[in-house]
Amino acid sequence: MDMNEEQPHVEDRCVPWSDGMQLLKDAAEGKHFLPTGLEGIDTLLGGGLRKGQLTEITGQSSSGKTQVCLYSAAHVAARHMGAVLYLDTSNSFSPSRIAHILDELPISLIKEPKDMRLKRVMSSIICESVFDIFALFEVLDRLEVSLNCKVTNGSNKICLLIIDSVSSLLAPIIGGKNSQGRSMMISVAMILKKLAHKHNLSVLVTNHMVAGNGAPKPALGESWKAAPHIRLMISRDRGSNICTATTLKHTLLACGRHMKFQFLPS
């Protein structure tokens, strides 16, 4: 991404890292964050996925965006933090990968037999296939109704909403001069941010990259750019499971910071 292309809007402005000390204090107490389970990302974000906010993970194909989603779902469910609604737009959700992630949890987090833990975690991750924008609106409407009625999944309230990938649903409707598609995209952004704020959810979405002037940039254009509170770009070292996460946008922490992290071997 060409960081010299355009100055960010006022709402996109990043403040110095030192101004995020309260955020880091809250992270230490586990109050306002959900862990991704990837140490580098959680450290970079000051604790994990911020509750009440929309976080976007962007990156090239095969950079690890779906892996971040799977790790986040597995760790939130495994740590009894609540239920996860996982909206899968490309059949990328992998129960076997979830099981593998759980097998590698630290000993301190393993307090139940392996088979019981897997059954509990999978029952706390609600995966729905969503293949077009209209299905997305329908699912988000049902989610809002259930949250307003304080419906829980068993004993767990939904605390994390994942859309992998939001750009697969939005990119097809915003081409050309038709303004209706952009209006629908803005409506999706407003609904996601409203759900996050009103119900203290963490919302995690993935976005692909497109060609830019000199360097690839996140897809969906300027209209979507203002939607996420936090935008994180990830890249993967060729032929390895080692990745780099870089902050492109954050409400409290400095942009441009980066951190290495590593996925478990598949």
Image (cartoon, rainbow, N blue to C red):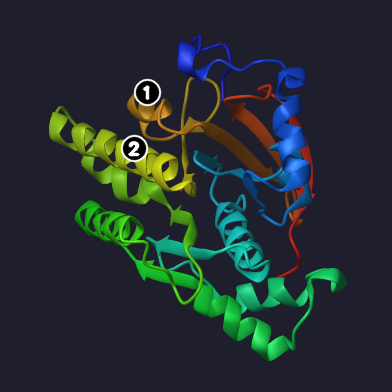
What residue is shown with label 2?
Answer: 189
Against 189, is 112 above or below?
below
* x and y, in percent, of residue 219 in the image: 42, 35
- The answer to whether residue 237 is seen in the rendering is no
- The answer to whether residue 53 is seen in the rendering is yes
* x and y, in percent, of residue 13 in the image: 55, 15
Mark 1: amino acid:
Glu
Look at 54% across and 78% down and name the residue there: 122
Against 213, is 125 above or below?
below
What is the number of the mark on residue 222?
1
* Residue 4 image-quadrant placement: top right
Nearer to us in this view, 215 or 6: 6
Nearest to N terminus: mark 1 or mark 2? 2
Look at 43% across and 44% down and name the residue there: 196
Against 29, is 252 above or below?
above
Q: Quadrant of the N terminus?
A: top right
Label 1 Cα crowd, 10 Å radius (few <14 / some 14-19 / many 20+) = few
Against 102, is 169 above or below?
above
Mark pair 1, 2: CA separation: 13 Å
**Left or right: 232 as drawn, with respect to 159:** right
**Left or right: 236 as drawn, with respect to 28:** left
The single residue placed furthest to the right in the displayed view is 107
Label 2 Cα crowd, 10 Å radius (few <14 / some 14-19 / many 20+) = some
Nearer to us in this view, 242 or 249: 249
* Residue 73 image-quadrant placement: bottom right
Look at 62% across and 73% down and name the residue there: 98
- Secondary structure under tag 2 reads helix
